[in-house]
Amino acid sequence: MDTGAIDIGDLRGGFDLQATVESGQTYGWRRADGRMYEAVAAKGGSAWYHTVVPASLAPADEPAVVRARQVDGRIEWEATTDAEPLLVYLLRLDDDLDAIQRATPDDPLLQSAFDAYRGMRLVRDPPFVSLISFICSAQMRVGRIYGMQVALAREFGEKVAFDGESYHAFPTAEQLAAATEAELRELSLGYRAPYVAESATLVAEGVADPAAARGLPYEDAREHLKRFVGVGDKVADCVLLFSLGYLEAVPLDTWIRSAIAEHYPDCERGSYTETSRAIRAAFGGEYAGYAQTYVFHHLRNGE
């Protein structure tokens, strides 16, 4: 077992592990006490979380288990490998949150959201994990989306042993492509089941790859992701923001559309593309996706 700690005082803008992994942007982390998404309004906390990093990102080209918690001003971790670079990458610990907040407009809603969840960071989820998670997100609360991803990993993912326990990696494209639609429906995916199966098949057969969107101009990248079954503008924006590093992306979900109606009515332009451009500008452009995530979490928690 490898262990270590990261001093939160060394991170520009601090860090809040709970807010980061329980804010609806990632469904690849699990909470050891089983209370993931139960206390969404809580801030901070010292619960243990774990994830299984896919072989494509792990140092030894095999899935790696990483456990982490926030306690006494540091991030403590235990893992099957040196987890510090993985945590820096997956949790964007290299972002300068102070600079990002300074670049955000001096707007009451935005500043209130940033103040409420100081230290919350965006994530860099593996592209296929993010794609499937957000295909499952249509018309679903975060707790239900999370439950679907847990079930997919349990039923189809590889078991990884660590410290006397078994952990389930998220299924590869090949593993999900081999699942039948009936098997996926049994996991409560409903009408999303064929979308998951068909999108996994596209990746498994080499026809399309969500990671290939990386590096394209933003709106072209969004169009690239829409080739996957069940992916529209909003889901594509989620994958761009929470996996591929497009920090300007603003998924127009129910909460953000409510914020537009109440706080930024001039940004409603009638189409997703034009409304997206307007709210990105209102949220500061380059880091608009950070503003979106803070507002989403803030409003969803009823604050």
Image (cartoon, helix red, strand yellow):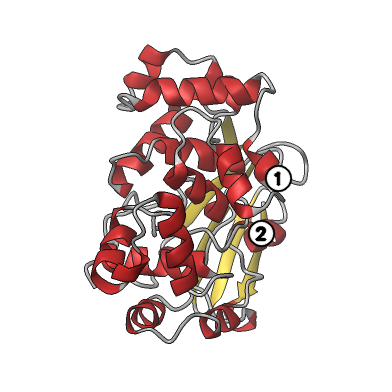
Residue at horizontal 56%, vertical 69%?
Answer: 75
Residue lying at the far right in this picture: please name it.
60
Q: In the image, residue 299 lies at what x, y percent?
A: 28, 67
Q: Which one is nearer the viewer's eye here, 186 or 233?
A: 233
Q: Which one is nearer the viewer's eye here, 167 or 146?
A: 146
CA neighbours of label 1 inside 10 A, class few (<14), some (14 to 19), many (20+):
some
Please tell me whether mark 1 sits on a helix, a strand or a loop: loop
Q: Which one is nearer the viewer's eye here, 61 or 287?
A: 287
Q: In the image, residue 31 lies at what x, y percent?
A: 41, 52
Q: In the image, residue 36 lies at what x, y percent?
A: 34, 52
Please tell me whether mark 2 sits on a helix, a strand or a loop: helix
* The quarter of the displayed image where residue 6 is located: bottom right
Residue at horizontal 50%, vertical 20%?
Answer: 198
Q: Which mark is residue 57?
A: 1
Q: In the image, residue 126 lies at what x, y percent?
A: 60, 44
The answer to whether 177 is drawn above or below residue 84 in the figure is above
Q: Which mark is residue 89?
A: 2
Q: Which mark is residue 82?
A: none
The answer to whether 17 is drawn above or below residue 60 in the figure is below
Q: Three-letter amino acid code at disc 2? A: Tyr
Chain-order first, disc 1 or disc 2: 1
Residue at horizontal 41%, vertical 50%?
Answer: 272
Residue 108 seen from this side = yes
Discs 1, 2 touching: Cβ within 8 Å: yes
